[in-house]
Image (tube, rainbow, N blue to C red):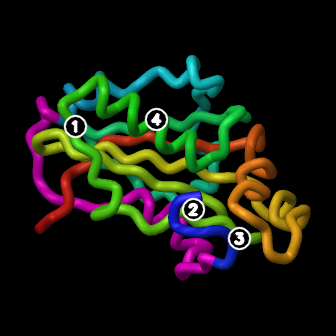
Amino acid sequence: MAGGALGRVATASAMGLALAAGLTACTGDSQAERAADQLPDLTAEGLEQVDCDQFSAQNLEPIEDPYVRQCWTGSPETPFVQEADAIIGIITASTDAEEITEFICVDDVIIDTVAFACRAAYDDEVMYRVVVSLPDPESIVSGLPDAPTEEEIAEAVSGAPVQVVVQTEKTPEE
């Protein structure tokens, strides 16, 4: 997994989705509306779009108009980190966006209290952010050996239920 196996505590718990879902700056409405129209349909990834209120809403910062947020659930065959990579890949392939994950997102994390992967891309004045999380990481982590390998972790999370947040937002201030 990107960023290491277990133990990447990285001050993650409640910070997870909250940090993964919110920086700000300036952009034009038409640019944001165009970006919103270009968000991918993730049904081909085996995901189902749901109301974001079904997620841990206390960790999601409100989204400002004209930016949008879509929420998806499902159990993809790939590990959640690879699913995040695939979704940001779909976005960069269908837009002029360039991936900027290393500048925006914290490292991927999987511990018993939180598991998520964040990816980001920038297109002119709009940022796309993807966060794929496991709603019940404890059930997966508790089944792993004490010092799991990357392969053991990938096998354990493959097919696990995920929650996916895809959103457009203002670009971060320099």
Distance in Å between CA atoms under marks 2 and 1: 29 Å
User: Any mark on residue 97, and which?
Assistant: 1
10 or 1, nearer to the observer: 1
Distance in Å between CA atoms under marks 1 and 4: 13 Å
Mark 2 crowd level (few <14, some 14–19, many ≥20, 10 Å Cα): few
Q: Type of residue at label 1?
A: Ala
Magenta extent: 8-31
Mark 1 crowd level (few <14, some 14–19, many ≥20, 10 Å Cα): many
Mark 3 crowd level (few <14, some 14–19, many ≥20, 10 Å Cα): some
In this rendering, would 47 be left or right of 25? right
Query: Is residue 18 magenta-colored?
Result: yes
Q: Type of residue at label 4?
A: Ile
Q: Type of residue at label 2?
A: Gln
Residue picked out by circle 2? 58
Name the dominant secondary structure of the magenta segment: loop
Look at discs 3 and 2 and give the one toward the viewer: 3
Seen at 73% across and 55% down, the residue is 151
Q: Are marks 2 and 4 in contact (CB under 8 Å)?
A: no
Secondary element under disc 1, as helix, strand or loop, is: loop
Figure check: 41 above or below 143: above
Indicate which disc, 1 or 4, sits on the residue closer to the N terminus. Answer: 4
Indicate which disc, 2 or 4, sits on the residue closer to the N terminus. Answer: 2
Residue 164 found in image quarter: top right
Q: Position of residue 118 (x, y in %)?
A: 46, 55
User: Any mark on residue 111, and which?
Assistant: 3
Q: Are marks 3 and 2 in contact (CB under 8 Å)?
A: no
